[in-house]
């Protein structure tokens, strides 16, 4: 089998469209997972069982259910209840919600790693509870959890091809579309594989840079 460079050139318009969708899903999904994960972590520390138990049940259910099942549920079942979203919005919400249950554990570990003396010092200074969290606890916890959060960003990137199951044409979806039209599989799939490696590497470099700046 020979490598067809013309097929690579023909595939590039498909590739750029797919890459844009992949990066959209990654950015918005990360934003949802990081924000919602912090909310879950804080709710788990509320000293009320009526809050802790429902949050724990929901997050355990989401974390132990396959992402593909969640995608199908949100895309095919929710419209029957009158909640219909676009395929792209459904994919972003599903990935963000799914990974928020993992980032929750990361945040919880980071908060618990803050020395008890920091809490005691805030209490001694008579700081309000909200300010203690904003100015003392969360800044220290976030610096500790950046590497782990970065790992989940890369995991989200690798899971974006699952969105093809609900008609979202990200990179792999575009490659499949091109292959079906041209009956050429080697070139587009190779390009997609290289693209995932490059994007993962660039994302890891960005996260390492952010980690070094936060440690200063």
Image: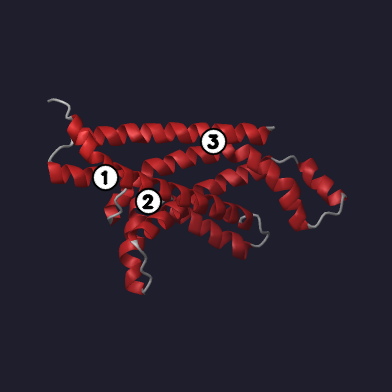
Residue at 75% in and 49% down: 135
Which sits in the foreground, 29 or 76?
29
**Residue at image coords 27%, 55%:** 167
Eye-nearest disc, 2 or 1: 1
The label on residue 80 is none
Instruction: Judge whether residue 39 can be spotted in this image.
Output: yes
Residue 148, quarter of the rendered image: top right
Disc 3 designates what residue? 207
Disc 2 target residue: 67
Q: Quadrant of the C terminus?
A: top right
Residue denoted by label 1: 14
**Counting residues from the N terminus, which is met first, the one under dot 2 or under dot 1?**
1
Regarding mark 1 in the picture, which secondary structure is present there?
helix
Q: Nearer the viewer, residue 8 or 27?
A: 8
The answer to whether the residue labelled 2 contacts the one labelled 3, judged by CB atoms less than 8 Å apart, is no
Could you give the CA–CA distance between mark 3 and mark 1, rounded to whole angstroms?
Answer: 28 Å
The answer to the question of whether label 3 and label 1 lie on touching residues, with beta carbons closer than 8 A, is no
Number of the front mark, 2 or 3: 3
Mark 2 and mark 3 lie on one chain; the one further toward the N terminus is 2
Report the residue that reaches farthest toward the bottom: 82
Pinpoint residue 97: horizontal percent, then vertical percent: 46, 55
Secondary-structure class at tag 2 = helix
In this rendering, would 169 be left or right of 106? left
How far is disc 2 from disc 3 in space, using C-alphas? 24 Å
If the image is split into quadrants, where does the N terminus sit? Answer: top left
Q: In the image, what residue occupies the spot 51% across and 51% down?
A: 31
């Amino acid at each position: 089998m020979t490598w067809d460079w013309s097929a690579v050139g023909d595939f590039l318009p498909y590739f750029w469209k797919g890459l844009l969708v992949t990066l959209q899903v990654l950015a918005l999904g990360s934003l949802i997972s990081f924000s919602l994960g912090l909310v879950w972590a804080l709710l788990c520390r509320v000293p009320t069982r009526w809050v802790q138990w429902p949050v724990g049940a929901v997050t355990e259910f989401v974390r132990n259910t396959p992402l593909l099942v969640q995608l199908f549920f949100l895309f095919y079942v929710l419209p029957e209840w009158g909640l219909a979203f676009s395929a792209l919005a459904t994919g972003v919400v599903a990935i963000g919600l799914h990974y928020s249950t993992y980032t929750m554990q990361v945040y919880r570990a980071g908060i618990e790693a803050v020395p008890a003396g920091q809490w005691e010092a805030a209490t001694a200074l008579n700081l309000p509870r909200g300010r203690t969290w904003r100015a003392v606890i969360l800044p220290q916890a976030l610096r500790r959890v950046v590497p782990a959060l970065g790992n989940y960003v890369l995991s989200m990137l690798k899971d974006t091809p699952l969105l093809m199951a609900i008609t979202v044409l990200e990179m792999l979806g575009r490659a499949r579309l091109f292959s079906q039209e041209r009956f050429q599989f080697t070139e587009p799939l190779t390009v997609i594989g290289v693209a995932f490696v490059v994007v993962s590497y660039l994302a890891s470099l960005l996260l390492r840079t952010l980690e070094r700046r936060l440690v200063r």
